Amino acid sequence: MESFLASSDLLLGFVPVFASVLALPGPNAAFAVGQSLKYGVVRSLFVPLGFMLATGIHAAMVLSGLGVLVLQYASALVVLKWLGVLYLLYLGYKAFTARASVLAVSPEPMSGRTMLTTAMLVSLTNPKALLASLMLYPLFIRDAGSYAAQSVALGLVAMAVSFGIYAGYVLAASLVRRRLVRSHRANRIVGAFYLGAAGALAAK
């Protein structure tokens, strides 16, 4: 019982720390806002879902020891990162060259699957996310108790926090979307968020 309470206290301490790291503006947040402005809150929920899955993958990599191995072969991450940057630049270009009179879904809107996988790519190729995971997760593992159980608990909590943070970004962006729908600058604003996400990812 005492061990359970101690583990619960550690998890409760993990939530605000992990949430504060995720909430910092970066490529993930910029991508979430851009998608929400373009497609609305319901369709854009695929974005925080993709980030949530990426968080789970990062947790599995770090807590299983694969994270250290991945860092030894960082060149593969660099290639994937630049592919993500190029795709975000492409989205920015499409937004800037779209009709400027109305903020509307493009003739071929991004599918939910594409949105989810793109969000995963943006997050998984962000070195900051992996490094933050490597630094944070070990701090909340106790010597006493099952390592596997603690790892699963941390991973699940991290995924829930990730979804909540980025769903919050999507919701916040949707609140101003109505004001932008008929703005002549709307697509440029969306394009700016895509370019911002590409720049933030490239700078990592």
Image: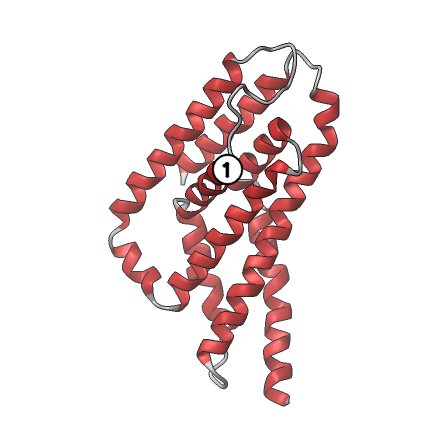
Residue at (50, 77) in percent of width and height: 149
> Badge 1, how many Cα within 10 Å: few under 14, some, many 20+?
many
Q: Nearer the viewer, residue 186 or 109?
A: 109
Residue nearest the observer in this picture, 115 or 10? 115
Q: Residue at x 59, y 73 (%)?
A: 10
View extreme (bottom): residue: 1
Tell me which residue sits at (44%, 29%) in the image.
88
Quadrant of the frame with the N terminus: bottom right
69 is higher (above) or lower (below) than 32 = below
Residue 130 lies, in percent from the top left, at: 41, 54
Is the residue 87 above or below the residue 135 in the image?
above
**Among the 4 quarters of the image, the one containing residue 160:** bottom right
Instruction: Locate residue 137, reporting x and y percent.
Output: 48, 66
Q: Residue at x 48, y 41 (%)?
A: 119
Q: Name the kind of residue labelled 1 in the image.
A: Met
Q: Nearer the viewer, residue 80 or 132?
A: 80
Q: Is residue 181 left or right of residue 144?
A: right
Q: Is residue 143 left or right of residue 19?
A: left
Residue topped by disc 1: 115
Q: How many marks overall?
A: 1
Coordinates of residue 75 in the picture (x, y in percent): 25, 45
Where, quadrant-wise, is the C terminus in this rendering? top left
Q: Secondary structure at mark 1?
A: helix
Expressed as whole percent of the image width and height from the top left, the position of residue 188 reads 57, 17
Q: Quadrant of residue 167?
A: top right
Does residue 157 appear left or right of residue 174 in this picture?
left
Looking at the image, residue 178 lies above or below residue 74: above
